[in-house]
Amino acid sequence: MFNNYNLSDDEVMEIIFSNKKLIDKYSRLSSKAPIDEDLRAEIIEKIYRTLTRNRER
Amino acid sequence: MYKLSKQERTMLIVIMKNARIDYYRRNKRFFEMLDIDEEILCSKENVNEIVENKLDNEIQVNTIENIFSNINVSKIVKALTYNEKLVLSLYYLEGKSDEEIGKILFMTRSAANKKRLRAIEKIKSQAEKRGISNVQ
């Protein structure tokens, strides 16, 4: 799982954009609430950090 | 294009869920400080308006407590929960309908109706316990 060491920034951003709907879904604190922009940013940041963690330096 | 496997997609969902939990926990103190439920705070309505409504509600509850100054009856009223007192006060003192009460307390019409009936039942049972017969 995500043990690909060659994921470039563009590829990571592509993964994030292709899962935009899923991110929007989890950016709501409850089902009726609107999207929380701060939470959305945090989710994107966490995904980016996770996907680039194994990158070779 | 990088295609996610089923496992990777599940992992993404777990990351998102954890991020959401962390975010909520970090801001929990803020939600508690305002004494506003998470759902209300995130609604599109104005927060100031909601806080004002909450203050109005507290006045309503105090009013119903003051009306029943008789020691026995006041004990019965004190046995009710905050929301039950509020519903009774709005229905009987303000003359609001179940639907209007539902809108004020962010619940459905039937929930407001059920809450009111349950409060009446509670009053009746408490009155019987304390030997007060003429509770209508």
Image (spheres, rainbow, N blue to C red):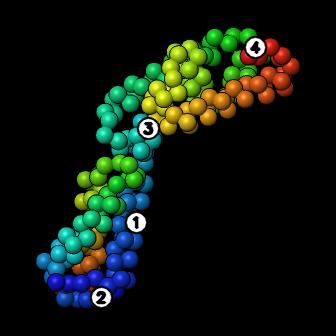
Q: Residue at 69%, 26% (x, y): give it.
A: B120
Mark 1: few/some/many CA within 10 Å (<14, 14-19, 20+): some
- Of callouts 1 and 4, which one flags the residue occurring earlier in the amino acid sequence? 1
For the residues labelled 2 and 1, the Cα–Cα distance comes to 20 Å
* Amino acid type shown at disc 2: Asn
The residue at which mark 4 appears reads as B71
Assess whether mark 3 and mark 1 are in contact (beta carbons under 8 angstroms).
Answer: no
Q: Which mark is residue B36?
A: 3
The residue at which mark 2 appears reads as A3
Percent x, y of residue A23: 29, 64
The residue at which mark 1 appears reads as B18
Q: Is residue B58 visible?
A: no
Q: Is residue A48 left or right of residue B78?
A: left
Q: Chain of mark 4?
A: B
**Would you identify the image quadrant in which residue A52 lies?**
bottom left
Percent x, y of residue B96: 50, 20
Q: Residue at 43%, 54% (x, y): give it.
A: B25
For the residues labelled 1 and 3, the Cα–Cα distance comes to 23 Å
Q: Residue at 56%, 14% (x, y): give it.
A: B93
Q: Which mark is residue A40?
A: none
